[in-house]
Image (cartoon, coloured by chain):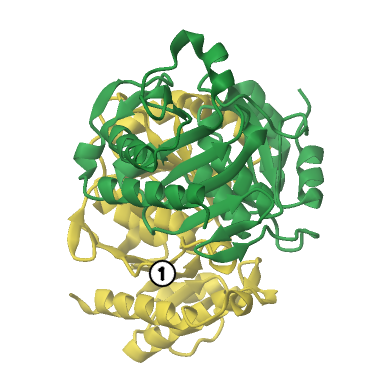
Chain colours: A green, B yellow
Amino acid sequence: MDSIMSMFHDICMNVRSRVNTMSRKEAGISLARGAGGDITKKIDKVGEDAALEVVRRYGIDCTVVSEEAGVVYSNSYKKVGEDYASNVKDSKCFIALDAIDGTTNAVRGIPFYSCSVAYAVSDRLSSVTHAAVMDITSGDIYYAVKGYGAYMNGSRIKTVDVSSEKDGYIIGINLSGISMDRLRRMGKILAMVNHIRQFGSNALEMCLLARGLLDAYIDVRGKIRVIDIAAAYLIVSEAGGIVVDEHCKALDAPLNLDARLSFIASANEYMLNYIFSSIASE
Amino acid sequence: MDSIMSMFHDICMNVRSRVNTMSRKEAGISLARGAGGDITKKIDKVGEDAALEVVRRYGIDCTVVSEEAGVVYSNSYKKVGEDYASNVKDSKCFIALDAIDGTTNAVRGIPFYSCSVAYAVSDRLSSVTHAAVMDITSGDIYYAVKGYGAYMNGSRIKTVDVSSEKDGYIIGINLSGISMDRLRRMGKILAMVNHIRQFGSNALEMCLLARGLLDAYIDVRGKIRVIDIAAAYLIVSEAGGIVVDEHCKALDAPLNLDARLSFIASANEYMLNYIFSSIASE
């Protein structure tokens, strides 16, 4: 295991161990609004602190992009602030962190939430080279290194080779807070697909796709942040899946907290064609 | 524990033990079309056989309504057939069985499916007096006896006392294969609710509501069978929740395989009002 993957493993383990000692009541305490604009829950802060502690211990000098802390240098933890654009030019590496993806589930006691962390060599999603997502409940860890495939607990994982519709598809679709216009675009696919799923952690749902448990995962709300899916994006890609934007172009975005994405992740080309033939154009 | 609950416990345990020895490949073998009209998977048949075996062992003389077998007398397992209407008049009790609720999840390896069984003193949903739902993965069992509350593994469970929207609601909505018209009715609530969930087993999702993990569960597709929700209907009601039809009237239906329902299950009155104010009328 290279040092990045070793650090990611330690990050996930440390986050899991810290948040697993919290009661649901403590986990759900509302703190201030995070750098990403959402209300931070205590579990988010405890998780992020646990992750940043490991980054610092490894002494890696990079720019960290994270929901609560914002954009910070890993050594100083100083905010990058308004001079972000000029400063990040000098950064040799980037870490996109979502310490708790699926906070609502965690706080309510639904056992489906994860820790997601990705490493990139420039400030773009497409430059992510290392990724890890841990299912915090089970401790299962999904990970990938660009060009070397995707794994779950040491075993290679692959997306399903979808080639016919005989048993009906099983597709994850994020519909939470979707606008009426975008919902209308999804009408045909919702009517056609007999098995829609929505578990409440984008990162972990994409790992189910990478493992072959879902045939696709769709989020066209235009609401998801890059840090939420940076790790899962690589895991799905390395498992043989395809991740595109709503216009069917290769997904890419700057690694910051401002960008909001729509994306479609599919097990293979066949499935992708099926989806695009079923989504109404704008 | 009375003898019905004792039998239900044994049914769930027997179903779980039989299906847990099956590989996913074996579980997914397609058999003929069941009495309910859907293609029976081998896991459905193995589960149902395991359940009926226990009913027979208890020697209870009643009418069993089940997806694969159809409507049968528990002692002879003869089909009730076309003379159903006249014959059931003589039946003193009814068992509504869905041995595997969430077959698709079970076959794909998604750990969210259940065994659901209800006992009624006449052939109506409203006359269900005993209910059990087992999470087959974890072995957690949810149960209720009319007038005596709802329980999970021996502990009393209650729905959430929803009274404000401060953290956003978390609502299960079944959208699989929903028609465009019905989807339109749901547009406003999908846009308003930040946390939509769909796990893939109606019975088990309603138990999450009974436990306080969801605020409501909505299925207005007009597709669900009475046997799928007969047990969960009583568990939610006994946990303090409210289950109504799409016109906000107390849910009721004959215990057969023909009826197809729409329903809204809510943690309390406040939540129910919120939902009906957010669903467009037809």
Kind of residue sitting beneath label 1: Ile
Instruction: Tell me the residue that label 1 is attached to.
Output: B136
Location of residue A39 with respect to A164 vertically, above or below: above
Residue drawn where x is 23% and y is 43% of the image = A24
The image shows residue B260, relative to residue B109, as above or below, that is: above
Q: Position of residue A77 (x, y in %)?
A: 36, 24
Image point 18% across, 65% down: which residue? B154
Q: Image quadrant for the N terminus of chain B?
A: bottom left
Q: Quadrant of residue B2?
A: bottom left
Q: Residue A103 vs residue A200: left or right?
A: left
Q: Position of residue B273 (x, y in %)?
A: 36, 28
Residue sitting at 65 percent across and 56 percent down?
Answer: A149
Residue B129 in sight in this render: yes
In the foreground, B62 or B23? B23
Residue toward you, B230 or A228: A228
The residue closer to the viewer here, A199 or B13, is: A199
Q: Please state the horizontal and vertical placement of residue A26, each as a whole percent of the image.
A: 20, 38
Q: Is residue B116 left or right of residue A177?
A: left
- Secondary structure, mark 1, is loop
Name which quarter of the figure residue A25 lies in. top left
Q: Is residue B115 above or below residue A151?
A: below
User: Foreground residue, A267 or B186?
Assistant: A267
Which chain does the numbered disc 1 sit on?
B
Seen in the image, is A111 located left or right of residue A230?
A: left
Counting from the top left corner in percent of width and height, residue B147 is at 19, 57
Split into 4 quadrants, where in the image is the C terminus of chain B?
Answer: top right
Numbered disc total: 1
Vertical order, A119 against B192 (above or below): below
Q: Is disc 1 surrounded by few (<14), some (14 to 19) or many (20+) residues within 10 Å?
A: many
- Furthest residue in direction top, as rendered: A82
- The answer to whether residue B73 is visible is no
Question: Residue at the spot x=82%, y=44% of the render?
Answer: A273
